[in-house]
Amino acid sequence: MKRSLVLGLIAFLIGSAIAVRAQQEILNASYDISRELFADVNKAFVPAYKDSGGGDVVVKQSHAGSSRQARSILEGLKADVVTFNQVGDVQLLADGKLVAKDWSSKFANNSSPYYSVHSILVRKGNPKGIKGWADLARPGVSIVQVNPKTGGNGRYAVLAYQAAGLQANGGDAAKARALTKKILANVVVFESGGRTATSTFTEREIGDVLVTFEAETLALANAPGSAFEVVTPSVSVLAEFPVAVVEKVAKKRGTEALAKAYLDFLYTPQGQEILARNYYRPRNAEVAARYAAKLTPVKIVEVSDTFGGWDKATADFFANGALVDVLLKEIAAERVN
């Protein structure tokens, strides 16, 4: 009797060990404000993958500023896939030979299954009467945003200011620079990441305005009992959300097929529906049409067309000694004087 119990226990433990080994696991390293989005995606992907014959899987999430996530992976974070908010952060991994050199052609739309724009969150009633980017330059308007030196969210904000200035002034770069400077002078907090910026504005009640991705502003404004409203400027910068398999990690862990399937899922009608439901702009035309009323049409300018691509934009605006550094030094000097 005892022997049969022991043998039964051994068989159970062996079976459990095999089941654990059979259950694949991947880690998705993503940007700061995408926690809820990918929790929603994962709830749908896991059963869909199993139904397709892929077996049981676990998808874990890691969230921080997109650029910080890229550095963490370079320093050893074992992510199987990345879902970032800036092309340059994936390219950094490609340069480090963790991601395929031709990563942007591995999936459709330059490996960007969805996109967004930057918008403005204000307090209920819009007490400062904000209607667009130019209003952020007015005296007495206080702004919270992500630090453009450390996060893609903040970089898109700066490029949106500059694009608005160019649009309003017939392409005059000097006038656009002046507008960007006035807006940056009104920033009272430069946060390290998007969710921290949201908390500063909504929980600590600092600032008249939060500048961040439209998905975040719409989610906040449409929450039950919301104390906020969204202002969607007429012009903004295309914010792409590039994805990639971290091939060096996935090959070693044997998760390449699962990692690819996970990113492919974002392009499916079901995945696109989840993205749109979370206020991101889907690539699928039919899904986009269903959500057109919720996602206001905006004149979208592309970094490649207006700023010469991300490499040039980084060198011109965000590198050490580039325009953002220059403007912040000028602002600081003027405050002292």
Image (tube, rainbow, N blue to C red):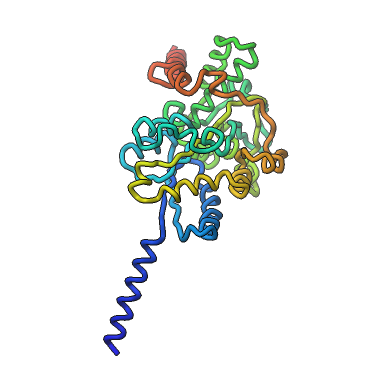
Residue in view at x 34 percent, y 32 percent: 96
Q: Residue at x 48, y 39 (%)?
A: 243
Q: Residue 255's spot in the image, x, y percent? A: 40, 50
Q: Position of residue 167 (x, y in %)?
A: 63, 16
Q: Is residue 202 visible?
A: yes
Disc count in the image? 0
Answer whether residue 196 is visible to the viewer in this image. Answer: no
Q: Is residue 336 left or right of residue 214?
A: left
Horizontal side of 252 relative to 179 (left or right) equals left
Occupied quadrant, residue 124: top right
Please name whichever residue, 333 or 134, is drawn nearer the observer in this view of the structure.
134
Q: Position of residue 155 (x, y in %)?
A: 49, 27
Identify which residue is drawn at 44% across, 36% down: 66
Q: Is residue 94 above or below residue 175?
A: below
**Is 154 displayed left or right of 18 in the figure?**
right
Q: Quadrant of the N terminus?
A: bottom left
In the displayed structure, 24 sits above or below 16; it is above
Viewer-nearest residue: 121 or 107: 107
- Residue, far bottom: 1
Q: Is residue 128 above or below residue 280?
A: above
Residue located at (62% from left, 39% from top): 282
Quarter location, residue 170? top right
- Counting from the top left corner in percent of width and height, residue 300 is at 63, 26
Quarter placement of the C terminus: top left
Q: Is residue 120 left or right of residue 54?
A: right
Locate residue 276: give its quadrant: top right
Q: Residue furthest left?
A: 3
